Image: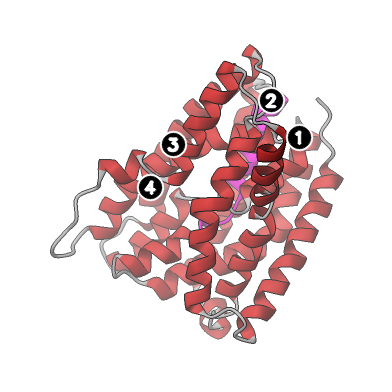
Amino acid sequence: MQINPSLVVSKVAMLFLILLIGFYAGKKRFVDEKGTKTLSSLLVNITSPLLIITSFQMDFEAEKLKNALIILGASVVIHILMTFFGKLLFGWEKEAEKNKIMRFSIIFGNCAFLGYPVLDAIFGEGVGVFYGSFYCLMFNLYLWTYGIVMLQKGKENVEKPSLKKVFVNAGTIASLVGIVLFAAGIKLPGILWDAVDMVGDLTFPLSMIIIGTLISRLDFKKVLTNKRVYIFCAFKLLLQPLLMIAVCKILSLPEVISYMLITMCAVPSATNTAIFAELYDCDSSLAAQCVGLSTLFSMVTLPAMIQLAGWIL
């Protein structure tokens, strides 16, 4: 398959412009903290699941399913390795509360909010989101188990990870529904398809507006003087995707799998980092700094990594 890195650059540039619109909306308080949470809930529970379902509306091909299962397996390995690297970089007990936010930020990337739009630019026709959904199956599983346990470490009245939240969430359900429709060759009828597709397409601009509003509330003086966040960004946005490019080259992985994995390793910290830090009474200010600064830097580093992958692969 032919990958056009310049198309990715233009797509990321467009996403950045939408992010600036979200930033303006946040600064002017057109969208306040409550509004951001409402939009996030709409995206997570409605628009993103519908986008996932439409991405599975393609003719069944054994090759696609094989690639998807390889990506799922790779996602398991990547999340475990990022746990190891997170402990290596930020595993010391001094300032343990801050360091667990750094580890969480390294492990969990913005696979859906930013990953899906970029994958759509690379592959088009829903293929990128199709493969991304398999990667995010492990993301959701790991987030609601290990991620929750890590954030609650050292806290009183610890809540045990809920199996219901692991498996009964909008993203996982949409992926499973999509897989069934894909395997059975079932296509949504015309009017239903149009409605689902139109609402699903809201995911891309909505995700960037949400990220923009989150960034608008950052204290940039505090962000730009935090050395810990720069170390995190260097690993998350540069070293991690570079390592994945090297692995894909050494193993001679198919291009579709290589670009999929490289993209998911090059995305910034997940927006959920800030949301979960607030929810579990952790350092939400530091979490917001990690999300905000890594997202801003990724507008340059992400297309650069895709371009570099194009040259090397």
Location of residue 313 (image quadrant): top right
Q: Which residue is mark 3?
A: 138
Q: CA distance from mark 1 to mark 2?
A: 9 Å
Amino acid type of disc 1?
A: Glu
Do tag 4 and tag 1 residues touch (Cβ < 8 Å)? no
Q: Residue at x 76, y 55 (%)?
A: 12
Badge 1 marks a residue whose secondary structure is: loop
Q: Which residue is mark 4?
A: 143
Badge 2 marks a residue whose secondary structure is: loop
Residue 210: image location, x then y, percent: 59, 67
Q: Which mark is residue 58?
A: 2
Q: CA distance from mark 1 to mark 3?
A: 23 Å
Give the residues in magenta. 255-271
Residue mark closest to the camera, 4 vs 1:
1
Residue mark closest to the camera, 1 vs 3:
1
Point out the tag, 4 or 2, that comes first from the N-terminus. Answer: 2
> Relative to the observer, which residue lies in front, 273 or 199?
199
Local packing at callout 2 (Cα closer than 10 Å; few below 14, some 14-19, many 20+) is some
